[in-house]
Image (cartoon, rainbow, N blue to C red):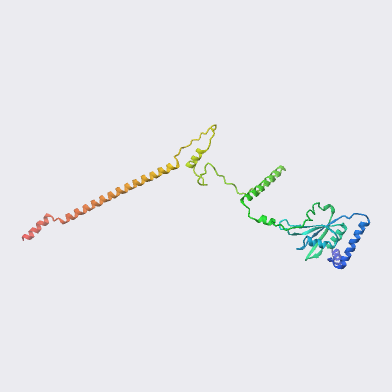
Amino acid sequence: MTESKAETASKPAKELLALNPKQESEFKKKVQEAKKNKSSKGIRLSPGVIYVGHLPLGLFEPQLKTYFEQFGKVLRLRLSRSKKTGGSKGYAFVEFDCDEVAKIVAETMNNYLMGERLIKCHVIPPEKVHEKLFVGSQREFKKPSHPAVARYNKKHTTEQIAKVTEKLLRKESKLRKRLAAHGIEYDFPGFAAQVPPKKKSDAMNASTCSDDTTPVCTPSLLERRKSMIIDDNDEDEEIVIKMPAVDKDEECSSEEEDSDEEEEEEEEEEEEEEEEEEEEEEEEEEEEEESESEEPSAGDEAATEDVKAQ
């Protein structure tokens, strides 16, 4: 380990390549030699694809194409962009007309310092290049007028939310069926546990005037039962209680209230009469007491006569 470390320390560090005039002339010579060798052998030039990563901010398709065209002819270029924002993801794929040129570009541009970033570059083998890698690369990119971020963050209506929840529950049920078909016993709460349960409302016990549940024998419920159409073939053994209409009930209640008021008035009159009689009796008793106190007794009269005679 120490010997290998010493050897690595003794070796000079790899110089970060920059396309100055001297290196550019050497690079052009290498490219021309590679093309001459291909043409002299009569072999058709096969394109080569390179991967370029750690791209600095501000580099897009036009800038990358003009930069890599100094190495050779660029057939296609694909910059990876975000679907939500449309911004660059920091890596791209470049296709050159000659695979030898692509190899030289990868060797030259790997660990190249650009915009305070070390660019990573390597050749992609032809068998690993996907057939749809450069689909849409020729089309000029336009910033989306209605990006996905605005679509996701906008306020949704109740109908849209219900539609999304239904879709999620449908997908989840398919997933559960798929797991059961493979013999996997795995239970998970999923989206069904997050959906609030629906309120069960009994239609027969609900009042027509309000949403609150009311007793079964209300007049509105009885009228509704009468209005329901029942087939003749169906045997309905239910006993229907006939109740007076709501207007009659109100009239009866008003008459009862009037009779109660009259009885209360009569009782008040009788109480007043009794009070008056009691007052009269008390007054008569007081008068009799006064009269008795004013009339002199026989003993008093005799005493007065004796005094006068003396």
Nearest the eye: 256 or 187: 256
- Outermost residue, right direction? 40
Q: Position of residue 259 (x, y in %)?
A: 36, 44
Question: Does residue 304 appear to the left or right of 161 in the view shown?
Answer: left
What residue appears at the point 7 percent right and 59 percent down from the top-left corner?
Answer: 306
Q: Which quadrant of the rendered structure holds the C terminus?
A: bottom left
Q: How many marks?
A: 0
Nearest the eye: 175 or 246: 246
Nearest the eye: 77 or 267: 77
Q: Position of residue 275 (x, y in %)?
A: 28, 50
Question: Does residue 47 appear to the left or right of 143 in the view shown?
Answer: right
Does residue 191 show up? no
Where residue 26 sits, quadrant-wise, is: bottom right
Where residue 54 sits, quadrant-wise, is: bottom right
What residue appears at the point 86 percent right and 63 percent down from the top-left corner?
Answer: 4
Q: Position of residue 63 (x, y in %)?
A: 79, 62
What residue appears at the point 88 percent right and 63 percent down from the top-left corner?
Answer: 28
Question: Does residue 280 appear to the left or right of 186 in the view shown?
Answer: left
Does residue 101 show up? yes
The correct choice, above or below, for 41 with respect to 239 in the image is below
Q: Position of residue 287 (x, y in %)?
A: 20, 54
Q: Which quadrant of the rendered structure holds the N terminus?
A: bottom right
- Outermost residue, top direction? 233
